[in-house]
Image: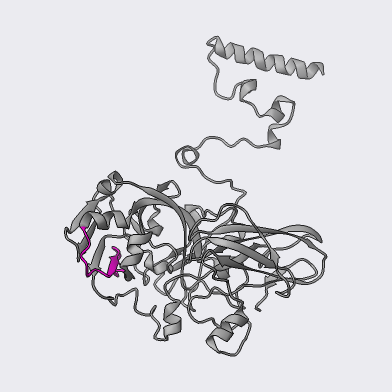
Amino acid sequence: MGSKQTSRREILKNGAALAGGLTLTSGAIAPALGQMPDHMAMGGSQNDYPMIMGSKELIEYGQRSHYVTSVRIMHPMGGRPSPDAFGKVFHLASPLQDSVGVVTPSSLHYVATTRGSYMPDIDPAKHTLTIHGLVDRPLTFTMEDLKRLPSVTRLHFIECAGNRHNGRQKTVQESHGMTSCAEWTGVLLSTLLKECGLKGNATWFVAEGSEEVKGASSMPIAKAMDDCLIAYGMNGEAVRPQNGFPLRLMVPGFEGIFNTKYLRRIKLVDRYYMNYNDFGHLQRDPKEAALSFQIGPKSVITRPSGGQQLPGRGFYEISGLAWSGGGAIRSVEVSTNGGRTWNRAEIKATPQRMAHTRFGYMWNWDGNEAEILSRCIDEIGQQQPTREQVAQYWNVPFERDYRVPGLDNSVMPWRIARDGSVTNGLA
């Protein structure tokens, strides 16, 4: 006891010497007591909790702990290799299996390119957005012009049409990682269109980006006047370059390719224009075309999911994400017996429109084989279908691993073995 008291007195004495103006070389004495971790002040070893010194990277732009290792992965879309023979990386999938809450960190947000074109390096001081066509006053806005206008901040998901699952995928990152949810800040497109003055025959608009291959998509004017957002902010900072810096169009609930990155031009027109982005995304089948704009109600269990391990029988929270292009999620159900019975899951926070919603369900695993899956209903009453229901809708023979036509929002099962290993239930 006496040695500890002496040690503390010496530390305080040295601290007082520093306050009195003594000049000591760096590291000559221990830091003052008030600067030490509590465990060291109580006699613990510095090696118990190594000190993380302030670095340029930590000070200027904080880094995550080196114990956290979640990363995006290159994602082959429809058999398309990434990177390709020329070294281009087309798609990066978000690690949903490690996600908590509903916001995807900007650095882990999924990325999809526009036909493999290179990411432009845009100086925001020189970037402009032009709105023209069937308007009374064609206008060009600088970034500063846009930031002077009334802003809104909203939580929205984006999902790529290639976000579809089959029996070959081993993890939820591979099966569902081409969706992410972020907080977006910017100006409503309707605000800008009101400034320009819409002509009566303006029924569609075309949004164009700044890539080498000019990404452009046609959308109905009703959507523009409803909730489209010209976003310059993402999760409290500028939009990341991979997600459209300095400006991207947010089209809540629509397929990802409509959310034009590096936005530079919007043209108001009186008919549907076939653009580069639209080619290959349109379907001649009227039933399939009707399901190609808006993402259907969708959910997936992220924990436990493929590649994870349950250490033993007992209580677990089954956790996952639900989202819908039709609005906010109204309810989520979880089945632990392959869909024979369903249980109401807990919604973790107030669901936002066209945003990821976190759900959870407490489950007492008895150690036997099990199949877990989830389904959701959105605010307009749409229910996420099982793969059997999808096959019935398309009037095709049912196979657990068949390719779902259109945008795939079918239920995804995970199989839990007796040893607690989790694998793809479609395999």
x and y percentages locating residue 305 in the rendered image: 66, 65
Q: Is 208 inside the magenta-drawn segment? A: yes
Viewer-nearest residue: 149 or 234:
149
Q: Give the magenta-colored segment's residue range.
A: 197-215
Q: Residue furthest left?
A: 137
Residue name at image x 19 percent, y 56 percent: 139
Main secondary structure found in the magenta portion: loop
Quadrant in which the C terminus is drawn? bottom right
Viewer-nearest residue: 381 or 329:
381
Viewer-nearest residue: 24 or 333:
333
Q: Quadrant of residue 341?
A: bottom right
x and y percentages locating residue 164 in the rendered image: 53, 74
Q: In this rendering, does residue 118 appear at all?
A: no
Residue name at image x 19 percent, y 66 percent: 134
Q: In this rendering, does residue 389 appear at all?
A: yes
Answer left or right for 89 relative to 188: right
x and y percentages locating residue 393 in the rendered image: 55, 84
- Colouring convention used in this rendered image of the protein: one colour
Residue name at image x 46 percent, y 38 percent: 56
Q: Is residue 190 above or below residue 22?
A: below
Q: Is 245 inside the magenta-drawn segment? A: no
Quadrant in which the N terminus is drawn? top right
